[in-house]
Image (spheres, grey):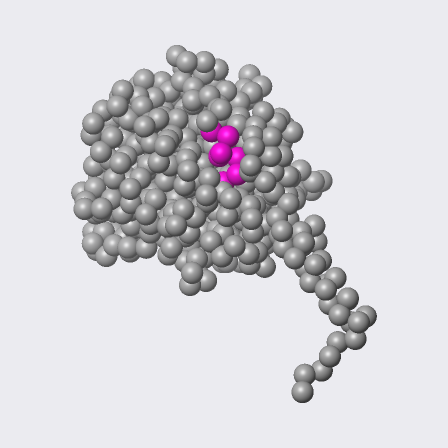
Amino acid sequence: MKSKLSPRSAVASILSAAILARAQVSQFSIDSTAAIKQSSSTLAYDMLQYYKGNLTGQTPGILPGPPPAGDYYWWEGGAMWGTLIDYWYWTGDSTYNNEIMQSMLFQVGENKDYMPRNVTASLGNDDQGFWGMAAMTAAENGFPNPPTDKPQWLELAQAVFNTQASPNRHDSTCGGGLRWQIPFANNGYDYKNSIANGCFFNLGARLYRYTGNNTYLEWADKTWDWMWKIGFIDNKNYAIYDGAHVATECTDINKAEFSYNNAVFAQGVAFMYNVTNGNQTWKNRLDGLLKHGTATFLPKGIAVEISCENVGTCTTDMITFKGFLHRWYSTITQLAPYTADTIRPVLKTSAQAAVKQCTGGALGRQCGFKWASGVYDGKTGAGQEMATLSAAMSLLIPEANVPKTEKSGGISKGNPNAGGGGDNALKAVKPITTADKAGAGILTFLVLGSACGIFGWMSVGM
């Protein structure tokens, strides 16, 4: 026989159920422009609760880390400031501009090329590339210029590009292409991957559109052709695979797919489509990437990180990727307007799912990662907040101005020689000798030792 609840217990049970149901209703709305801006404002605030760099004794620009000091590698700070530069541009909210300015300038490094020595032990071409792309976003968005005695946004993007275009980054293994890591003693130096080359391609395409300098066009063409030839971009369906090892001449391709690889190339291709006035070759490439990307990473209209999300293997790095997919796809609809009718409805459906599950934490609004589940997954962090913020604020793109160029309102000053690469980024470099390698190896060993030898593989793709 079933036991019966007393009237008092029944009332308490009903009240508890009502409170739980209310707690699981998201506080965020994307039903109007005003609602999107309000939701984005709160999401940006919540994301920055994970940032401690503006506190006394902390390091400006970085999220707590790297492990074991905190969850986050250096690159994710650059990704966060790039997100907030778009946030300012799309919402008009300048609340965080001082933090953006301070952080972007504090992390430029000794040579003003986003290669600070204190991150050497985990410095990849992709890590440097994310900071460079954030600087490029600042230039394209007309973000307030730094003081005149500081490096400028366009100059910083050019510095990153020039260091990556240097011959010592493009060796003959696998017929060319960038390696994942920059220092040869780092784990992952023997791996060439799509995201490192994707950031470089993306920067080249955007610098070409912004400046008109054909050097950037040549490198964009060269990078795409290499990715296609080596098979990192599948020649049949435009899937972009993670990477391969130089010891096999890049024949052992890891076919894991990540949304940011697709998105970083698709956005770069859209910039090329735009600057070439709708060139058919670039249109075909864009169509191929978008067709595969939406089917793969936006099934049923909701972003999913297919290689790790449903099997529970996503790292802290990977949790951010869906936000880049939203931001970069939304920009594509500006650069290639014919894509808007297809992409924007999908991004809206995905954004709705993203904000719906933000019901966690003491305030009942922390965001998780598994948007398609419809419920908060119990885990949050800067990456989850950044991705959801990106999904929400990207819906403002129809009202936003198209990224600027030098001829269409860009205010950032450049320096084609920034980073030491020269105007054509093809300066000859002194050959590396055995003694150089030995000295560099000792230095890197000391850096690694000081970090207790902790730094290793950040993830398969980052």
Q: Nearer the viewer, residue 269 or 375?
A: 375
Residue 285 horizontal/vertical position (percent)? 24, 35
Q: Horizontal placement of 447 versus 265: left or right?
A: right
Q: Is residue 394 magenta?
A: yes
Instruction: Please tell me which residue is depicted at 41% across the width and 30% down the height of the picture.
Output: 331
Q: How many marks?
A: 0
Q: Nearer the viewer, residue 365 or 17?
A: 17
Q: Nearer the viewer, residue 365 or 72?
A: 365
Q: Horizontal placement of 76 versus 45: left or right?
A: left
Report the residue that reaches farthest toward the bottom. 1
Q: Is residue 177 magenta?
A: no
Q: Is residue 268 above or below residue 432?
A: above
Instruction: Please tell me which residue is depicted at 39% across the width and 26% down the height of the picture.
Output: 334
Quadrant location of the N terminus in the rendered image: bottom right
Q: Which residues are magenta?
A: 391-397
Q: Is residue 4 above or below residue 393?
A: below
Magenta segment's dominant SS is helix
Instruction: Please tell me which residue is depicted at 52% across the width and 47% down the height of the picture.
Output: 354
Q: Horizontal placement of 336 versus 152: left or right?
A: left
Q: Is residue 251 above or below residue 224?
A: below
Residue 45 horizontal/vertical position (percent)? 64, 39
Residue 111 horizontal/vertical position (percent)? 47, 30
Instruction: Please tell me which residue is depicted at 53% across the width and 35% down the height of the picture.
Output: 393
Q: Is residue 333 visible?
A: yes
Residue 359 horizontal/vertical position (percent)? 62, 52
Q: Is residue 214 above or below residue 36?
A: above
Q: Is residue 103 visible?
A: no
